[in-house]
Each structure stands twice: as structure tokens, then as C-alpha cells.
């Protein structure tokens, strides 16, 4: 099985950054001009992006990547659009929110980013592992357990969020 490691686009890929106070208007004008085949949104202000996708009847995918309360509003906006889908990045997140979904919803696991140096782990070793041991995911509990059981091997893998920047060492 050959795995293709590059993504090829038949159309140019454009990334656009705008000031926050002009976000909706600028994005609306840009989407109207470019008319993408699909819009994928996550993190900050995805509700506005979904409403713009709805306005131009462009399929939209909302990615939910945490257990925060604001995701209920995001899901409600996605539910208002028949061409929206929701992607959760874990079973736990899907379990928390999927009962509120009226649009198709799926699980898509993030891959580990190549920019993060991966620890050298002996192939025969067994580790109690947590990906992104940040406070919102219980990182402090993970660290406390690791300190309280020194006979076990624990491994915290930093991925798209840096726990050290969030007060976890």
C-alpha cells in the first residue's frame, strides 16, 4: 500500500487574513468572488463562516475539537444548514455533542504534526500515554497520577497545543 504524502490541488489554494472587526464582511465578499467547492471551519467564529456558506449554498464542514460549552451554539448554527456536516476529533467529543446534531457527523482523528519532535520510545516499552496533556483535557490530573506512581512509565505527547505554554510542565 503506497501512501501519498502530498496534497495536490486542481485549483490554487488561497489563505486570507482579515482584521476581526471586518471579518464577516470581508469573508462574505471573498467567498462571493471565489466560490469555493467546500468550506471547512473551526476554532474562532465558525458560526459566521457557516452562515456565509449557507448564503451561497456552499457545503460546509464544522470541525469540533474540544469539549467547551460554546460548541452547542456552533452545532445549532450548523444544524440550520442542510449542506453542513460536523466532524469531531475524538470519540469522547462526539459522544458529548452528537445527540445535539441534526446534520451528518463523523469522527476524524488528528494526525500528529511533523513539526513536533517525537520522543524516542523503545518498541518493547509500555507507556501510559496522553496526547496533549493540557488543563482542559485533564493534563494536571495526568501529571499528578504520573508523579504518584513512579514505577510506571508515562508519556505526554505534545501535538497541536503546547502544554508548557498553558502552565503544565
Image (spheres, rainbow, N blue to C red):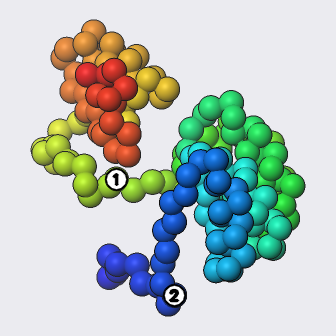
Left or right: 50, with 116 as reference point: right
* Residue 116 in the image: above or below residue 51: above
Q: Quadrant of the C terminus?
A: top left
Mark 2 Cα-neighbour bin, 10 Å: few <14, some 14–19, many ≥20: few
- Please name the residue that numbered disc 2 is placed on: 11
Q: What element carries label 1?
A: loop
Side (left or right) of 18 relative to 1: right
How many numbered marks, from 0 up?
2
Between 57 and 168, the residue placed more toward the observer is 57
Disc marking residue 112: 1
Most extreme residue toward the top, as rendered? 148
Q: Earlier in the sequence, mark 2 or mark 1?
A: 2
- Disc 2 versus disc 1: distance between alpha carbons? 27 Å
Residue 61 as seen in the image, left or right of residue 83 = left
Residue in the image at 80% along x and 73% along y? 56
Q: x and y percent of residue 53 in the render?
A: 75, 66
Q: Nearer the viewer, mark 2 or mark 1?
A: 2
* Residue drawn where x is 62% and y is 32% of the image: 68
Amino acid at each position: 500500500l503506497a501512501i501519498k504524502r502530498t496534497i495536490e490541488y486542481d485549483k490554487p489554494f488561497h489563505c486570507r487574513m482579515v482584521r476581526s472587526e471586518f471579518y464577516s464582511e470581508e469573508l462574505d465578499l471573498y467567498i462571493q468572488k471565489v466560490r469555493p467547492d467546500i468550506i471547512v471551519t473551526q476554532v474562532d467564529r465558525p458560526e459566521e463562516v457557516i452562515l456565509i456558506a449557507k448564503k451561497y449554498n456552499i457545503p460546509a464542514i464544522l470541525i469540533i475539537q474540544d469539549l467547551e460549552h460554546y460548541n452547542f451554539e456552533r452545532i445549532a448554527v450548523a444544524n440550520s444548514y442542510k449542506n453542513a456536516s460536523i466532524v469531531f476529533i475524538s470519540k469522547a467529543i462526539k459522544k458529548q455533542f452528537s445527540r445535539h446534531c441534526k446534520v451528518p457527523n463523523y469522527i476524524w482523528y488528528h494526525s500528529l504534526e511533523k513539526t513536533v519532535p517525537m520522543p524516542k520510545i523503545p518498541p518493547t516499552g509500555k507507556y501510559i500515554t496522553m496526547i496533549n496533556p493540557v488543563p482542559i483535557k485533564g493534563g494536571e490530573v495526568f501529571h499528578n497520577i504520573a508523579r504518584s506512581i513512579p514505577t510506571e512509565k508515562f508519556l505526554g505527547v505534545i501535538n497541536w497545543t503546547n502544554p508548557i505554554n498553558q502552565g503544565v510542565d
